[in-house]
Amino acid sequence: MASHYEAPIRRPLVLGEKSYHDVSVDIAKPVEGKANKSWWIVFSISLAAFLWGIGCIIYTISTGIGVWGLNKTIGWAWDITNFVWWVGIGHAGTLISAVLLLFRQKWRMAINRSAEAMTIFAVIQAGLFPLIHMGRPWLGYWVLPIPNQFGSLWVNFNSPLLWDVFAISTYLSVSLVFWWTGLLPDFAMIRDRAVKPFQKKIYSLLAFGWSGRAKDWQRFEEVSLVLAGLATPLVLSVHTIVSFDFATSIVPGWHTTIFPPYFVAGAVFSGFAMVNTLLIIMRKVVSLEDYITVQHIELMNIVIMITGSIVGVAYISELFIAWYSGVEYEQYAFLNRATGPYWWAYLLMMTCNVFSPQFMWFKKLRTSIMFSFFISIVVNVGMWFERFVIIVTSLHRDYMPSAWTMFQPTFVDIGIFIGTIGFFFVLFLLYARTFPVVSQAEVKAILKSSGQRYKRIRESGESLVGTGTDPRTHNINIHAGSPIVDEQSTVKAHDPEAINQLMDSVGVFDPLTQTKDDLQQINGVGPKMEEVLNGIGIYSFLQVSKMTKREYDLLDEITASFPGRAERDDWAGQAKILINNKE
Amino acid sequence: METSSKVIHAMYTDDDVLMAAVKKVRAERYHIEEIYTPFPVHGLDKAMGLAPTRLAITSFLYGCVGLVVSIVMIDYMMIEDWPQNIGGKPSFSYLENMPAFIPIMFELTVFFAAHLLVITFYLRSKLWPFKKAENPDIRTTDDHFLMEISAGDNIDEQFDILRNTGAVEVTLIDKAH
């Protein structure tokens, strides 16, 4: 038997008295319910921003890249800043689901679904920027390894920009199948709960016919593990390759060997910040505070603190190496970054990314939800400025002082950026309404080891065997000798005499040859009464149809509720009609 | 005599009870056809006697295929078909130019290993859009566990055993109908 043991020092990951059924109900609730007003307000704002962004993109493509603020000196600015920012944000999802899976961190299970969703939506935003920047996005397929139509010239496999194409598309597609595979059992849960035919159809389609066979689960777990093993080096490679876009150039300030680890740490840093931003709101809106707990937020804050500190060390190493290299151009690039006209951006980057996460050393602050939310926003801003500082300040003062200039974004630059934020939130909000936002199958799998209720049962020294039963989905045990009735029930279980007499006259239900009838079809029998009848041993219309005045009285004696009700409603007569209708 | 089309469905409401039941039923030498569970019950595959899955091995092989494809592709495009001198580094030898090709070799290895693995999983477990679900009871995706064993000649005895293992519902199903 599985032991479900977990060290008592580990805090529960699922709070409250949750049974398996509670997990299903809680996670299906946002999908089954209706959107509230605040959802519609945020969705409308995001949609407006998205539409504004589409307008700016159309303007860019129809007029040309000249509508951006780029100039002869600064050929790369907001577009690539936004691209790197979004790709970086898109790192947390796979990190949470893959790296934490390999390290067997159970706390990932409440947040991996949303983090992966966020990853995919963020990478979609990132992918837009190179596409728009091509100027003629309908020729975007030229980046694929296909011969160019003027001859047989191929794409350049030496170019980091082509590496990017392969890295980002592999990352996006692998993250997508990883996410979808994990979703199948959860879609199946919603499918099987769905009452409306349309919902049932949609979720049947999405669940790919998931049935939950033991063999399927065995394969499912193996596939998750192997995908995690593949995705872990993949996620590290993606931002490494993004950093190569800069590191393989010979621009002072970009030509740095520290870039790959520095970019990866920064990506994890910004990704966790965005996960915190989204989940702190989402747990509240869809009432999942018992699953995405303060402990989860605290652990994410610790990751933010560590990766923020790594990024800080990288910033300082860059300065040191620039000085130590003795190369004056390199030295000037960094001096200019910190003290030149863009000093404010550099200061903002340092404050937001290195200084602000240090507050997380204090337990009081990292367990404060408001403070965590605030810091997560600060980090998002800081990481945008990090990319801006790296890209723009390295370019704006090049080797030729007569070409020195500043960057001024146009409304189109700003509009496209805001548009991607809008698009991102549109996708995330739609996701939060239609997808199971917590990986419920995995949460159920750890419930007995990490659920608060089961920890309590285990610590009190009782066995966990049989504790998965939920009285709402199953509260009768038809094979036990005497009926089992819960305490609130009005059945006097101490009246075996009356029960025996009643059973003698109506006959014993044989589950082997007979099927259980829906007794609630009888007018006057509600869910509670059906429960009581089942508890006594009455399951079929046939049994009810045999009831007479004597049996009704016996029933009244047993249940002690609604005396005379059964006789007045003529249950036996109704049961006979129901039997006839059945045949 | 074989009553092959008849199976017995035993419903459980707890994973630990199910695990004990699996061991008991197997000890009684009855064949467990299938078990449907709402979440992965650890150790269930071993207790049921399922063979280990070989998907990880296929993934390794797919990764090897991806690596070979990337090498052949890059060699053909960059070295054989149209060698260019890029940045003073002529493309005349795959080995000498390989450092620049490693990122894409790696990405394609992962691409093949991951996607073909998932496709294999979907095909083997019969998962695709418009596929009908085959769990016999919808409660098995919520909090119920269903064990299906083939019915023998001594159905009564089988029923008794299943009830004694803590099954909350035991039903005889004729699959022919």
Image (tube, coloured by chain):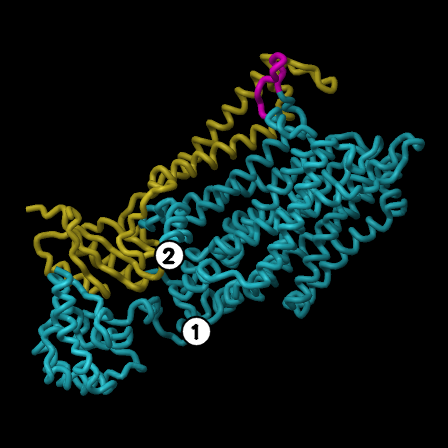
Label 2's element?
A: loop
In the rendered structure, which amino acid carries the disc numbered 1?
Arg
Q: Which residues are magenta?
A: A144-154
Q: Is residue A329 left or right of residue A548?
A: right
* Count of numbered circles in the view: 2
Q: Which residue is mark 1?
A: A456
Badge 1: how crowded within 10 Å, few (<14), some, or many (20+)?
few
| Mark pair 2, 1: CA separation | 38 Å
Coordinates of residue A285 in the picture (x, y in percent): 56, 64
The percent coordinates of residue B84 (x first, y second) are: 67, 14
Which chain's residue wears label 2?
A: A
Q: Are marks 2 and 1 on the same chain?
A: yes
**Residue nearer the viewer, B113 or A569:** A569
Instruction: Name which residue lies at 28% across and 73% down.
Output: A527
Graded by Cα atoms within 10 Å as few (under 14), some (14 to 19) or many (20 or more), the crowding at tag 2 reads few
Residue B147 falls inside the magenta stretch = no
**Along the viewing direction, whichever of A38 and B3 lies nearer the viewer:** A38
The cyan-tinted chain is A
Outermost residue toward the left?
A: B1
The residue carrying mark 2 is A196
Q: Residue at x 29, y 78 (%)?
A: A486
Residue B106, percent across and down? 56, 31
- Residue A404 in view (yes/no): yes
Residue A5 is situated, as x and y percent measured from the top left of the image, at: 42, 64
Q: In the figure, residue B105 lies in which quadrant?
A: top right
Q: Earlier in the sequence, mark 2 or mark 1?
A: 2
Residue kind at label 2, given as amino acid type: Lys
Q: Colour of chain B?
A: yellow
Residue B54 position (above or below residue A316): above
